[in-house]
Amino acid sequence: MTWFRTFLFVVVPVVFAGCGDAGDPKAGRWVWLIHCSDCHGEKGVPMVPAAPDFSRCEGMEQFDFQLAKTIRDGTETMPAAGELIDEDDINNVVAYIRTLYK
């Protein structure tokens, strides 16, 4: 029974750590087109050299909460969107990013 408790309280929360804030990819597409597509392309194919190619699954190894943090806080090459996009729309954009890999 000890292994089951370890699994339940240690392994399960780690596996599902990035899954709780699933957004709406259809709503995320509109936010993406307005705020993200100039650099990341309409379908995830980058328009600038430093952007990941989401159509080829680049950068998608991250949990949703990690992608949301990147969108919110920005990076060295990407401006922060947290002032422009609310938390629900950030989660919607993450959901949309997940649809771009073909």
Image (cartoon, rainbow, N blue to C red):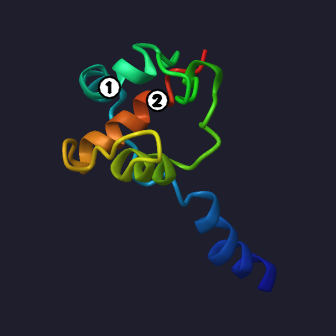
In percent of width and height, residue 71 lies at 38, 44
User: Which residue lies at the image location 47% right of the left edge and 16% below the top edge?
Assistant: 47
Image quadrant assignment for residue 36: top left
Question: Do the residues bearing badges 2 and 1 touch, measured as CB atoms within 8 Å?
Answer: yes
**What element does badge 2 sit on?**
helix
Residue in front for this viewpoint, 53 or 18: 53
Image quadrant assignment for residue 57: top right
Dot 1, how many residues are within 10 Å of its Cα: few (below 14), some (14-19), or many (20+)? Answer: many
Instruction: Examine the rendered structure and indicate whether residue 62 appears above or below residue 32.
Output: below
Q: Is residue 4 left or right of residue 41?
A: right
The total number of labels drawn is: 2
In percent of width and height, residue 91 lies at 35, 43
In percent of width and height, residue 85 lies at 22, 42
Residue receiving disc 2: 97
Image quadrant where one finds the N terminus: bottom right
**Circle number at residue 62:** none
Q: Amino acid at mark 2?
A: Ile
**Circle number at residue 32:** 1
In percent of width and height, residue 11 lies at 69, 68
Instruction: Examine the rendered structure and indicate whether residue 58 appears above or below residue 10.
Output: above
Is residue 1 in view from this perspective? no
Residue in front for this viewpoint, 95 or 83: 83
Image quadrant where one finds the C terminus: top right
**What element does badge 1 sit on?**
helix
Is residue 68 in view from this perspective? yes
Alpha-carbon span between mark 2 and mark 1: 9 Å
User: Which residue lies at the image location 36% right of the left edge and 28% below the top edge?
Assistant: 25
User: Which residue lies at the image location 49% right of the left edge and 21% below the top edge?
Assistant: 48
User: Which residue lies at the image location 31% right of the left edge and 29% below the top edge?
Assistant: 28
Residue in front for this viewpoint, 67 or 16: 67
Q: Amino acid at mark 1?
A: Trp
